[in-house]
Image (cartoon, helix red, strand yellow):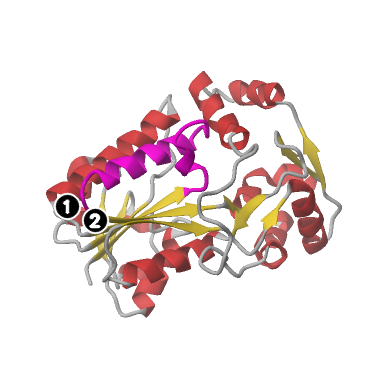
Amino acid sequence: MSIVVTTPTGHVGSRVVQLLLQAGVRPTVLVRDAARLEPGVREHCTVVEGDQDDVEAVLRATARAETLYWVNPPSLHDDPVAGHARFGAVAAAAVAENAVARVVFQSSVGAEAREGFGDIDGLARTEELLDATGAHTTHLRCGYFFTNLLLDLESVRAGVLSTTLPVDHRMPWVDPRDIGEVAAARLLAGDWTGRHTQGVHGPEDLSFAEVARIVGAAVGRPLTAQQVEESEVAEALRGLGFTDAQVEGVLGMSRGQRGFVPENPRDALTTTPTRLGAWAWSVLRPALEQ
């Protein structure tokens, strides 16, 4: 099988690559800097260096590819939705020109709304661009990553989890490694056709209040969920140099969750096994101790 994987050093992509290697597949990986790949992994992959907004690099990586695993990397564009759409356009151009048969795209819960979800609206645009190529597509509608907690270690150390959502609002939370396992299974099943969406919702829906209780018990320190005003978050982000569109992209991801029901219901197909407490013990606790 000829499979191309983007973002192969990320939380999800690295797991996808590992599983493909263990399945006996030599994947092609598109990576900005090959030195970031572990040597033991690099020797079993075909490596193409380049950026994902570089059409020529993506064309090289996908030449003769049967299947593509596409992830929009973080966008530094002043308008994150436009930035995601640019990545989507590059992917779609390569899929069309190289006649890539199947694409598995790492999307998000909320993309099905098509608007009103901040940054996630850019993933919705990417879904539409990939669908328009005529390739067989599967869009993974992923829940909120456990690893987002690693982005705010100081707040966790201070005993506070902040959110603009009501602290009792429940939504899917998921371990990125579990997303990698769902993605790898789909990539290796090479006989599916048509357009599909696949929810990846973690083991259970959780509120920030429940997350604070579970994580606090796992890391051995008290943790409280606290709802903050959007204006407070916006001011802090602007102080860090965020543009108005970037601020709206961040706030919109939470705002869209209010009253929203994912298109893919929680069932045997969308539920993944790793529980937040186990992840927090094995990953977050050591990170807090560094």
- For disc 1, the neighbor class at 10 Å (few under 14, some 14 to 19, many from 20) is some
Q: Secondary structure at mark 2?
A: strand
Task: Give the quarter of the image for residue 82.
Answer: top left
- Which circle marks residue 60 in the picture? 1
Region rendered in magenta: 108-135
Residue 114 in percent (x, y) is at: 44, 36
Question: Which residue is pictured at 35% across the width and 72% down the height?
Answer: 20
Left/right placement of residue 123 relative to residue 102 reads right
Between marks 1 and 2, how big is the CA–CA gap?
7 Å
Is residue 127 on the magenta stretch? yes
Residue 278 in percent (x, y) is at: 69, 68
- For disc 2, the neighbor class at 10 Å (few under 14, some 14 to 19, many from 20) is many
Which numbered mark, 1 or 2, is in the foreground of this view? 1
Is residue 147 on the magenta stretch? no
Residue type at mark 2? Val
Q: On the rendered image, what quadrant is the N terminus found in?
A: bottom left
Residue 4 in percent (x, y) is at: 27, 60
Question: Does residue 134 show up?
Answer: yes
Residue 29 in percent (x, y) is at: 29, 60
Q: Earlier in the sequence, mark 1 or mark 2?
A: 2
- Which circle marks residue 48 in the picture? 2
Q: Assess whether mark 2 and mark 1 are in contact (beta carbons under 8 angstroms).
A: yes
- Which circle marks residue 82 in the picture? none
Question: Which residue is pictured at 46% across the width and 43% down the height?
Answer: 112
